[in-house]
Image: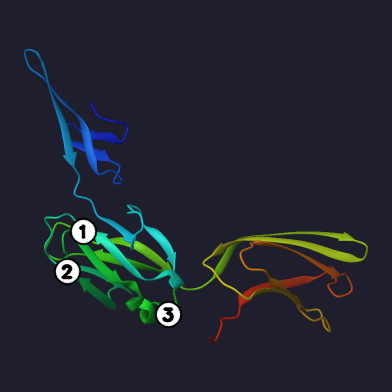
Amino acid sequence: MASALLRMISPNIVEFDTRQNDIQGSLVFHFEQKFTIDVNIQIPVIRWRHLNANWKAETEEIWHEDLGDIEVKIPIVVKKPINLSVGGGKQVISSLVRQGIAIFNLRRFSDTLFESDKSLQEIILSCSKTEIHSFVIMRVRTRWQVKKINLIQRLQDDNRHLLLEWQDLGRAINRVVRFWPLNIPDINPIEQAIPDDVNRINITVPVNLMPPGRYRLQSSHCRSLE
């Protein structure tokens, strides 16, 4: 028998949740009488974590400002160095495995990450000449973007009231939103500062400063020069 974390693919193959550290169950044989063997199989797993944090089994997205030292837990039988790479192998860093742990400083990837046009990039773990297959251990976001933008407006007392909502991808400070008029002469863009740590703002503008028409919505931020 098997737990809900196991799914039988064939009589000889089972599929399991890779977040588990072991498989517990029973092997049942039917001879002249039923014969049962309890089993507890330790899974040779790979885990990663920021220093002194909890171990993670899932691929996660991190913000580039959070790059730092990470530990990677490797099956104890692996003795060869572990590699992390970005940019399709443009930069590779290696670490020896000591007592089943490899330590990496991800800040070494910073220059390579920012040279790319991609806002979200993959860090690949690999170990040559072993049974460990290459896989994405995490993704790093280097640019603030937004998605799922929603705009609700209403008119009241000669004012245009706008409720703007969005979902942040990454983090930023000193953010602003601008409405640029299209094909409306003599009308300046409407600019509103966005407070930190919010993803919705209310904007009130006199109708004469924001007449009916088509506008381009722009979101941007100013980086500190410190």
- Residue type, numbered disc 2: Leu
**Mark 1 vs mark 3, CA separation in Å:** 27 Å
Disc 1 target residue? 133
**The disc label shown at residue 214, or none:** none
Q: Among all residues in the image, which is located at the extreme right? A: 157
Instruction: State the image quarter where residue 93 is shown.
Output: bottom left
Mark in the foreground, 3 or 2: 2
| Mark 3 to mark 2 CA distance (whole Å) | 27 Å
Determine the secondary structure under disc 3. helix
Q: Foreground residue, 135 or 75?
A: 75
**Residue 157, above or below 173:** above
**Residue at image location 25% in from the left, 67% down from the top:** 103
Disc sitting over residue 114 in the figure: 3
- Secondary structure category for the residue under label 1: loop
Which colour scheme appears in the figure? rainbow
In this view, 125 is above or below 57: below
State the separation of the CA atoms marked 2 and 1: 17 Å
Return the disc, 2 or 1, that comes first in the chain's sequence: 2
Question: Label 1: how many residues lie within 10 Å, few (<14), some (14-19) or many (20+)?
Answer: few
**Residue 170 pos. (x, y %):** 51, 67
Three-letter residue code for mark 3: Phe
Q: Quadrant of the N terminus?
A: top left
Sooner in the amino-acid sequence: mark 1 or mark 3: 3
Q: Which residue is mark 2?
A: 96
Instruction: Look at the picture and state if 167 lies above or below 208.
Output: above
